[in-house]
Amino acid sequence: MNPQKYLTPHILIVLIVILSIVAPFSTDMYLPGLPIIVEYFGTTDAILNMTLYGFMMFMAVGILILGPISDKYGRKPILLVSLIAYTIISTLCAFSPDIRVFILLRIIQGIAAGGMLVISTALIKDCFEASIRDRILTLTVVMGVVGPLLSPIVGAYLIEAISWQSTLIAPAFLTAASVIVSLFFTESLPENEKFTGSVLGVILHQITLCRNKAFTLFLLSTSMLKLPFMAFLAVSSYIFIAGYGISGSLYSIFLAIDIVVGTAGMLVIQQIGYRIGGRRTGPIFIALGFLSGILMLTFGHAGAYICLLCFIPCGISAIGVRPYTISNLLKQYDGDTGSVSSLFNFTVMFIGCTGMIIGTLPWPDYITGLGTCSICASIASAVLWIILVKSGMKLRGMD
């Protein structure tokens, strides 16, 4: 454990939670306003969605680069630069004169959000001992649910009371406050653990980590389950608001229900996992994703409430698999925390971005697309999992 001189463990946990929920705030808060923004810029659904998956794609790039760089220069410089950049760019997004500038600013905003996300994961290993790390991971995930839970509700209120632009300015206040807190943060990476090679060398070092086939197969298998969930975020407002005609406020409640049930399901599966072992827990998440796909294709067109119920198993799978994955990945290497965090978050973001693109393809309808995405992602995850298990490869910390 690397104790902080000025920040108590409780304040540090709050900072980590804020860093991890900025990305959901950046996407979920303005989801209720997507149909309005389409009209505002005089554009199309497909072009506007570039602000979603463009953000996610370049957040993945930021993660891939800034995580390893934090292994060389430390967590605090990357943390401060990312927070300051996000605060400025998020504010500028609200004043975009056209859709092209909006997309460009969202891309830059995504890079900054990637830096915050990767540092949040690295700090968990830097600052907390292994004996309590799993509990901190779970705690931050549960507390982090407050962000995705409240952001669409707050976003719908802000859109109705002020404008859609306010949903972009609001997160900037949160990161601005975090800048002040971070000034009192003492560097958590000891000098003797910093990477001594070049910047390019520390980035390319991730290739070495990926040569661990068990590590890579496990990472890819579990990350695939994020694909249909991100596809859902990209098209859900069009399904429920534009398609079923529900209000923005009710839509935000729908998202909240999915996240609350998903978090509850995560906690239940964790308890089951403690009894049956980590290697037997993975297939539970895969099965839930496959079940959701079948339900979506079979019953998803029966109405807004039925459609929501059909997607809930996928929500449980996508939310629950995150702490399960990163907890086991961090056990595989004693060092290289920034690089491991970077690889995990990059893979999740890249696959999630792919899900957003696939979700907005010209399907017969978005519900059919979501169901197909969920089934295909689950099958791909299952194939990778079977290869991992049948090969006899070992993962540290899993039976």
Image: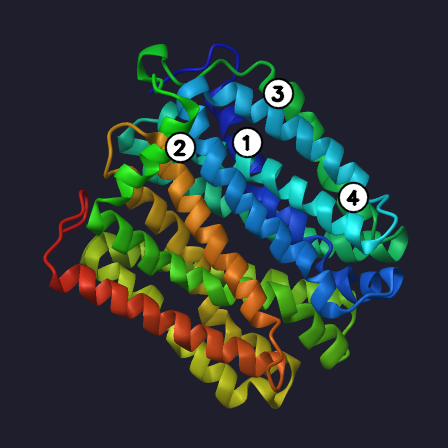
| First of labels 3, 2 by sequence position | 3
Q: CA distance from mark 3 to mark 4?
A: 24 Å
Circle 4 is placed at which residue position?
A: 93
Q: Position of residue 268 (x, y in %)?
A: 36, 59
Circle 2 is placed at which residue position?
A: 203
Q: Where is the N terminus found, in terms of image quarters?
A: top left
Tell me the number on the disc at residue 181. Answer: 3
What's under tag 1, amino acid-wise? Val
Q: Are marks 3 and 4 in contact (CB under 8 Å)?
A: no
What's under tag 3, amino acid-wise? Val
| First of labels 2, 1 by sequence position | 1
Q: CA distance from mark 3 to mark 2?
A: 28 Å
Query: Mark 1: which secondary structure?
Result: helix
* Farthest left residue in view: 392
Q: Position of residue 294 (x, y in %)?
A: 43, 83
Q: Are marks 3 and 1 in contact (CB under 8 Å)?
A: no
Dot 1, how many residues are within 10 Å of its Cα: few (below 14), some (14-19), or many (20+)? some
Q: Are marks 4 and 2 in contact (CB under 8 Å)?
A: no
> Is residue 124 shown to the viewer in this render?
no
Circle 1 is placed at which residue position?
A: 14
Q: Are marks 2 and 1 in contact (CB under 8 Å)?
A: no
Q: CA distance from mark 2 to mark 1?
A: 29 Å
| First of labels 3, 4 by sequence position | 4
| First of labels 1, 4 by sequence position | 1
Residue at image x 32%, y 29%? 336
| First of labels 4, 2 by sequence position | 4
Tell me if 372 is positioned left or right of 151 in this view: left
- Tell us which disc is closer to us: 3 or 2: 2
What's under tag 4, amino acid-wise? Cys
Query: Mark 4: which secondary structure?
Result: helix
Q: CA distance from mark 1 to mark 4?
A: 26 Å
- Tell us which disc is closer to us: 4 or 2: 2
